[in-house]
Image (spheres, grey):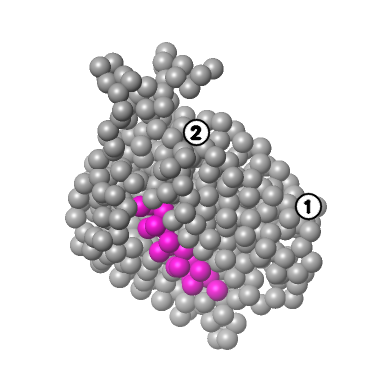
């Protein structure tokens, strides 16, 4: 079947298939990344490493998959998202399999850290950038449904990985996860399309104008990447996103060991991380549509503020159910932030360099991800407490909310 035939005679707008493809990319890539809490204790025991050192494995990976968006976004704008995403999915699967042969924590960094980091870096931004081109009216909802794959992957993958580790050990678990990523990633690449013009369509499902058939398409509206990088609004958004994300990834790494410090079991700790995924999924599905009505810029500021409030609540939470409430609330607001930030970025700067702008913006998230979890772990190693790391993370989110709340609703 040709690409052109896919755009005709379909009862469902093909843009939703692109959303489904992006969902699979997020589900497999971030699901694999967020299995890390299930491997935290096995890796620490196997290699005799401290919490701060083990946390560095996740942070290297997280830094890469947001930092590399600055490369994969422009590359996808130039050659299309499918080959870039395909390369990313292959890196994730093969990196996980390579980690199963590790004989040191350095080898885990090279396998899991680099493989997953490079893989997500080359798949996330191109996939979410493609979704933006398929929608205008429903862009917030479409983005939310696409990145819901992150939430569902976070919800399902850590308990699944913990179960496999319990039965087969951590090495076999890495092999099983790697094979699953390769299979699901292949399906995602087959469904993905870079823009509605490839199928003779326009955003939101309108048919292309026959009078324009065969004519060179006009460039999408908006700013070039060079113009964006000269704009004060971009750098204010960049700083806000970076401050927020210093704390955003600390619970993914440290909530499970924090729970064990309170006397909960390792499995209960892993399930708490899974509950972040439950809340995150709700945030991505529900808050995207809400933001389309109330304004995406205002919504981003609100969820950033509420993320900081959730982290402050973590300081007071004791016992499984209190921590479960924190995990659900934190996940809800974190999920809303991840769903809305790409759509709001397009509101501000337009579609002209969509994936490129999103990719450069996500380098701020990379720096926050690299700093937050290891610093939290190292402070704990020295002080025996998570109080100061959590308080600093909450403060970063509150400051970020103030910065983002002062931005305009749109520029393009």
Q: Nearer the viewer, residue 62 or 268?
A: 62
Mark 2, residue position: 192
Mark 1, residue position: 172
Which segment is the magenta one? 357-374
Please report the residue visible at 55 percent of the width from the left and 66 percent of the height from the top. Answer: 59
The part of the image, by quadrant, that contains residue 188 is: top right
* Residue 258 location (% of width, % of height): 57, 71
The relative height of residue 319 versus residue 128 in the rendered view (above or below) is below
* Residue 72 location (% of width, % of height): 48, 50
* Residue 100 location (% of width, % of height): 76, 57
Q: Residue furthest bottom?
A: 382
- Numbered circles on residues, count: 2
The relative height of residue 205 versus residue 330 in the rendered view (above or below) is above
Mark 2 surroundings: few (<14), some (14-19) or many (≥20) residues within 10 A: many
Tell me if I can see residue 132 in this picture.
yes
> Does residue 358 belong to the magenta stretch?
yes
* Main secondary structure type of the part rendered in magenta: helix
Asked which secondary structure carries label 2, the reply is: loop
Mark 1 surroundings: few (<14), some (14-19) or many (≥20) residues within 10 A: some
Please report the residue visible at 58 percent of the width from the left and 51 percent of the height from the top. Answer: 119
């Amino acid at each position: 079947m040709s690409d052109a035939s896919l755009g005709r005679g379909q009862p469902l707008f093909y843009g939703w298939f692109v959303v489904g493809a992006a969902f699979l990319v997020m589900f497999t890539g971030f699901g694999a990344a967020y299995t890390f809490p299930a491997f935290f204790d096995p890796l620490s025991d196997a290699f005799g490493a401290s919490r701060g050192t083990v946390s560095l494995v996740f942070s290297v990976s997280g830094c890469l998959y947001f930092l590399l968006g600055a490369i994969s976004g422009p590359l996808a704008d130039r050659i299309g998202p499918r080959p870039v995403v395909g390369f990313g999915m292959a890196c994730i699967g093969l990196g996980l399999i390579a980690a199963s042969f590790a004989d040191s924590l350095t080898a885990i960094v090279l396998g899991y850290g680099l493989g997953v980091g490079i893989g997500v870096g080359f798949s996330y931004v191109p996939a979410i950038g493609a979704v933006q081109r398929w929608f205008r009216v429903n862009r917030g909802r479409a983005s939310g449904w696409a990145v819901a794959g992150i939430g569902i992957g976070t919800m399902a993958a850590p308990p699944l990985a913990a179960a496999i580790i319990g039965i087969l050990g951590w090495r076999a678990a890495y092999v099983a996860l790697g094979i699953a990523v390769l299979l699901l990633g292949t399906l995602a690449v087959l469904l993905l399309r870079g823009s509605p013009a490839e199928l003779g369509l326009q955003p939101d499902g309108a048919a292309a104008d026959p009078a324009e058939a065969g004519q060179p398409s006009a460039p999408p509206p908006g700013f070039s990447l060079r113009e964006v990088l000269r704009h004060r609004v971009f750098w204010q958004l960049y700083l806000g996103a970076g401050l927020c994300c210093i704390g955003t990834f600390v619970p993914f790494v440290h909530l499970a060991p924090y729970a064990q410090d309170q006397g909960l079991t390792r499995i209960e700790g892993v399930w708490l991380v899974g509950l972040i995924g439950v809340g995150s999924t709700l945030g991505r599905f529900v808050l995207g549509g809400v933001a389309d009505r109330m304004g995406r810029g205002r919504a981003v500021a609100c969820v950033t503020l509420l993320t900081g409030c959730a982290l402050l609540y973590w300081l007071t939470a004791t016992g499984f159910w209190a921590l479960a409430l924190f995990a659900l609330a934190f996940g809800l607001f974190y999920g809303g932030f991840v769903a809305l930030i790409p759509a709001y970025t397009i509101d501000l700067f337009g579609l002209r360099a969509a994936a490129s702008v999103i990719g450069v913006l996500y380098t701020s998230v990379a720096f926050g991800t690299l700093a937050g979890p290891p610093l939290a772990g190292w402070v704990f190693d020295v002080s025996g407490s998570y109080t100061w790391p959590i308080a600093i993370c909450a403060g970063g989110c509150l400051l970020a909310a103030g910065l983002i709340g002062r931005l305009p609703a749109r520029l393009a």
